Amino acid sequence: MAESMNTKADLVVKGISYQGLNNYGKIMIGDKAFEFYNDRDVNDFIQIPWSEIDYIVADLVFGGKWIPRFAIETKQGYTFRFSASRETKRLLAKCRDYFPAERIVRARSAIENVRININNIIHRKGEKT
């Protein structure tokens, strides 16, 4: 059983970790870290101290009315993807208590990604001729 890094848990919600196979468990927001604990395997957990998080990227749907998933990008370059069933807005709001709000960003939409890729292709083609 893992020992929590947090001395105080502000929010505990059901969640899903998308590392490899989908793992169902609990997401804990506390004073020292973001933590995920798997329901089935006590040895399967993720603990990320607030000081090691670079960005929190939220996928917005319907103009921000629904946030189906979010990702945590660490300073070492790792990305952890999570989903909090119906509690994602509340969870991200609680993250702002311990993490700077300007580092919680919106993910690019599919249309923005297509536009960027087309522009990259056009610019690459222009450089070769």
Image: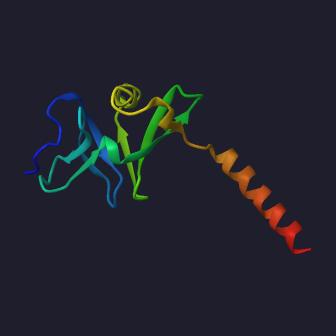
Q: In percent of the image, x 33 and y 43: which residue is there?
A: 51
- Residue 101 in the image, given as x and y percentages of width and height: 46, 30
Using the image as rendered, state which of residue 106 and residue 74 is in the foreground: 74
| Quadrant location, the C terminus | bottom right
- Residue 121 in the image, given as x and y percentages of width and height: 79, 63
Using the image as rendered, state which of residue 98 and residue 111 is in the foreground: 98
17 versus 68 height, above or below: below
Q: In percent of the image, x 26 and y 36: which residue is there?
A: 14
Tell me which corner region of the image, top left, top right, bottom left or bottom right, holds residue 32.
top left
> Residue 12 vs residue 86: left or right?
left
71 versus 97 height, above or below: below
> Residue 128 vs residue 102: left or right?
right
- Residue 34 in the image, given as x and y percentages of width and height: 28, 41
Q: In percent of the image, x 17 and y 37: which residue is there?
A: 6
- Residue 88 in the image, given as x and y percentages of width and height: 39, 31
Tell me which corner region of the image, top left, top right, bottom left or bottom right, holds residue 83.
top left
